[in-house]
Image (cartoon, rainbow, N blue to C red):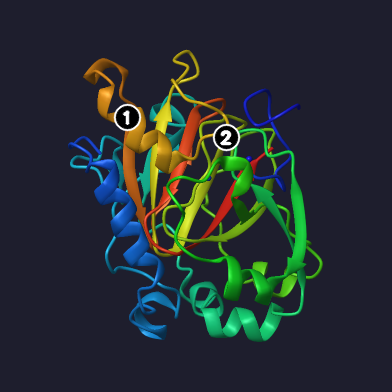
Amino acid sequence: MAGGRARGSRRATRLSEGAGLMAPASRLLALWALAAVALPGSGEEGDGGWRSGGPGAVAEEERCTVERRADLTYAEFVQQYAFVRPVILQGLTDNSRFRALCSRERLLASFGDRVVRLSTANTYSYQKVDLPFQEYVEQLLHPQDPTSLGNDTLYFFGDNNFTEWASLFRHYSPPPFGLLGTAPAYSFGIAGAGSGVPFHWHGPGYSEVIYGRKRWFLYPPEKTPEFHPNKTTLAWLRDTYPALPPSARPLECTIRAGEVLYFPDRWWHATLNLDTSVFISTFLG
């Protein structure tokens, strides 16, 4: 998502977004190598032309431990979740138009020549790189190398030029539940399978998946997770997660297209894209 991600609230336009046994490291590397050369996914109707499915080394968690709600009222949201715990919202908005505009073909046609700013996928994200959006999509949007460090991994999320992207953002309907004294700000992102951001925290907000799947790991503010700020979430899941006792494991769930995760203020969270994913966050600053 003052300082780095791990301390204080950050600007809304900055990079923030398995209970089973993990596969051996050799199998993990082999499967991601296969994913790197896999053919694109099921096309415009299913995944918008973004790569999804195929051989993946990281599965969804065995049991989602974040509650899903399809019938939540504003009063229930404030009383049960807003300041207490995360929740997954379903069916509160219709973003089918926005989703259609986020297909690979349409985004490249509309924004291919626009310069985007990439951040390194580590907790503090000091490094920034600018390059044309089409170059990012065609050359850098590939499955994460499990051996790469966070500061070697470039990630498109957060540093959007709102004037240039306004024609897209105006079609997005954010979650209807606000918090007193806050104003919403969008962060839009696209990232390859196996990519993600390691643990960090900031103010409250929402994250909606438009295409793909994004796995989340969350801890309450008083429970600092065990992690290295320059190791990717994929490396943390492979190396640290399997050894955690049940009492030290995070809340976790995989968010699918059309679902929205709400995370309260100062909750630690890390993300892992299971497919090439398109997503948008609404930060309440």
Q: Which residue is depicted at the point 49% across and 65% down?
A: 142
The vertical placement of 214 against 78, above or below, is below
Q: Amino acid at mark 1?
A: Tyr
Residue lying at 60% horizontally and 72% vertically, measured from the top left: 139
Name above or below for residue 192 compared with residue 82: below
Check the picture and name the quadrant holding the C terminus. top right
Q: Which residue is mark 2?
A: 204
Q: Does the rendering let one see residue 58?
A: no
* Foreground residue among 141 and 222: 141
Q: Residues within 10 Å of mark 1 (few under 14, many from 20)?
A: many
Q: Which residue is mark 1?
A: 241
Residue 148 to residue 85: above or below: below
Q: Nearer the viewer, residue 44 or 167?
A: 44
Residue 138 in view: yes
SS at mark 2 in the image: loop
| Residue 44 image position (x, y, % from top left) | 42, 84
Q: Which percent across, then down, holds residue 232?
A: 49, 40
Give the side of residue 252 with respect to residue 271, left or right.
Answer: left
Q: Earlier in the sequence, mark 1 or mark 2?
A: 2
